[in-house]
């Protein structure tokens, strides 16, 4: 009878004590969360109740296993298994606690500071720090598990003797991986690019969605994901539209006829921007930046608070301005002139001829035409009947 009751008492008592301690700890964390609702620490710590209970159960069973006298012929194997479970659950619990502390610190920082750029920088650093902590804890846990085997402890001396050669070989073999690893740390603490930044890489415009120690993911405007090694951002130039202040200035170009009403376009641009919610009201302007024999290049400058809004402002201005020109000033749209220029009244006689005896549009002896100040294309005379 004692052979049955002893294992039941030892194992059952360990399980019951584990459940009781886990329930009591969860209740305390829940009350602390209700009392201090301004911080998410206590609620985040509650997420570690499963590894916490595993640690308690494995520790209690490992400590009381000898008293249970169960499977004594397999005592070494059972003890090593409980030790492995204890090490793994402890590593899991440490990662959960570290994640709760780091996430709480980030939340408090984001609540106090209103600068989006600084918040994104801290968020990037926090994410990479958590990945480093998880990797270190995982490596230490795996090494501790291996050292529980006597054969691995015996091989430790020989491994340490050849560590230098192995390190050189591993460094050469994993050169790309190591470069990405150090590039990830450089990005995290060098403030080159952050999660949420708007960037242009290889001609693709998008938002940084994820940064790890080895790769970076950019979400493009059409919902595609571009995954790139982090070493790209430390070795090649790229555009970061969110660095510094997120405010941006956008440009809209039109190619119009020389008779385009530039002053009226300035007034119309002001009216369009006043009705556009994405415009931040900082600045706007219209200027003639270039001319060709057939068109004028007119540039409009508009401003917005970030990259998304500047895109909205640009497309709105471009569309509404073209619609207004088509309806109110169709002559301002680009065209090819095929008729002679109309002379001003001071140089035109009643019969339509110029005062110097030339027909309109006929060039002087030096090959220049004085009848029109702007270049034009003449259509050759038609021959044949009708």
Image (cartoon, rainbow, N blue to C red):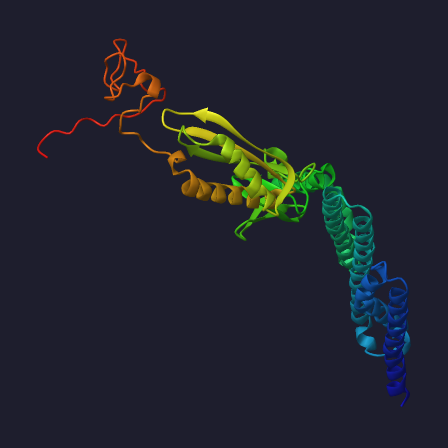
Q: Position of residue 145 (x, y in %)?
A: 77, 59
Whether residue 124 is visible to the viewer of this picture, yes or no, is: yes
Q: Position of residue 212 (x, y in %)?
A: 67, 48
Q: Is residue 24 above or below residue 337?
A: below
Left or right, residue 365 beside residue 320: left
Identify which residue is drawn at 34% across, 21% down.
345
Q: Is residue 142 left or right of residue 312?
A: right
Q: Is residue 319 above or below residue 15?
A: above
Disc tally is: 0
Position of the C terminus by quadrant: top left
User: Which residue is more in the foreground, 45 or 360?
Assistant: 360
In the displayed orientation, state which residue is furthest to the top.
366
Q: Is residue 56 left or right of residue 166?
A: right
Farthest bottom residue? 1
221 relative to 39, above or below: above
What is the quadrant of the N terminus in the image? bottom right
Observer-nearest of 155 and 238: 238
Figure quadrant of residue 137? bottom right
Q: Position of residue 301 (x, y in %)?
A: 56, 34
Residues 54 and 190: in front is: 190
User: Horizontal and vertical percent for residue 192?
Assistant: 68, 37
**Residue occupying the point 20% across, 26% down:** 380
* Residue 86 seen in the current view: no
Of all residues, the one furthest to the front in this rendering is 350
């Amino acid at each position: 009878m004692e052979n049955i009751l002893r294992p039941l008492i030892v194992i059952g008592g360990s399980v019951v004590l584990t459940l009781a301690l886990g329930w009591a700890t969860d209740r305390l964390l829940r009350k602390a969360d209700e009392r201090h609702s301004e911080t998410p620490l206590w609620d985040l710590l509650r997420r570690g109740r499963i590894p916490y209970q595993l640690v308690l159960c494995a520790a209690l069973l490992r400590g009381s296993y000898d008293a249970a006298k169960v499977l004594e012929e397999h005592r070494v194997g059972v003890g090593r298994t409980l030790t492995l479970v204890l090490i793994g659950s402890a590593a899991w619990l440490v990662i959960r606690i570290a994640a709760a502390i780091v996430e709480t610190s980030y939340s408090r920082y984001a609540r106090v500071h209103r600068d989006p750029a600084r918040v994104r920088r801290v968020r990037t650093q926090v994410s990479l720090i958590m990945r480093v902590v998880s990797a270190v804890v995982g490596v230490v846990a795996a090494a501790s598990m291996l050292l529980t085997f006597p054969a691995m402890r015996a091989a430790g001396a020989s491994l340490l003797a050849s560590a230098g050669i192995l390190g050189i070989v591993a460094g050469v073999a994993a050169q790309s991986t190591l470069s990405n690893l150090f590039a990830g740390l450089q990005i995290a603490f060098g403030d080159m690019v952050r999660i949420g930044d708007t960037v242009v890489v290889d001609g693709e415009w998008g938002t940084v969605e994820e940064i790890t120690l080895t790769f970076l993911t950019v979400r493009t405007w059409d919902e595609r994901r571009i995954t790139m090694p982090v070493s790209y951002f430390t070795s090649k130039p790229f555009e970061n539209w969110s660095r510094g202040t997120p405010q941006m200035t956008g440009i809209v170009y039109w190619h119009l006829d020389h008779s385009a009403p530039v002053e009226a376009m300035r007034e119309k641009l002001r009216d369009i921007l006043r009705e556009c919610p994405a415009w931040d009201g900082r600045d706007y302007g219209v200027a003639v930046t270039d001319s060709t024999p057939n068109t004028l290049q007119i540039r409009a400058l508009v401003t917005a608070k970030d990259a998304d809004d500047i895109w909205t402002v640009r497309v709105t201005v471009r569309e509404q301005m073209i619609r207004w020109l088509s309806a109110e000033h169709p002559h301002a749209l680009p065209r090819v002139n095929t008729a002679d220029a109309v002379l001003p009244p001071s140089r035109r006689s009643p019969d339509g001829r110029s005062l110097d005896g030339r027909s309109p549009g006929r060039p002087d002896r030096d090959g220049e035409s004085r009848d029109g100040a702007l270049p034009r294309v003449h259509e050759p005379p038609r021959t044949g009947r009708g």
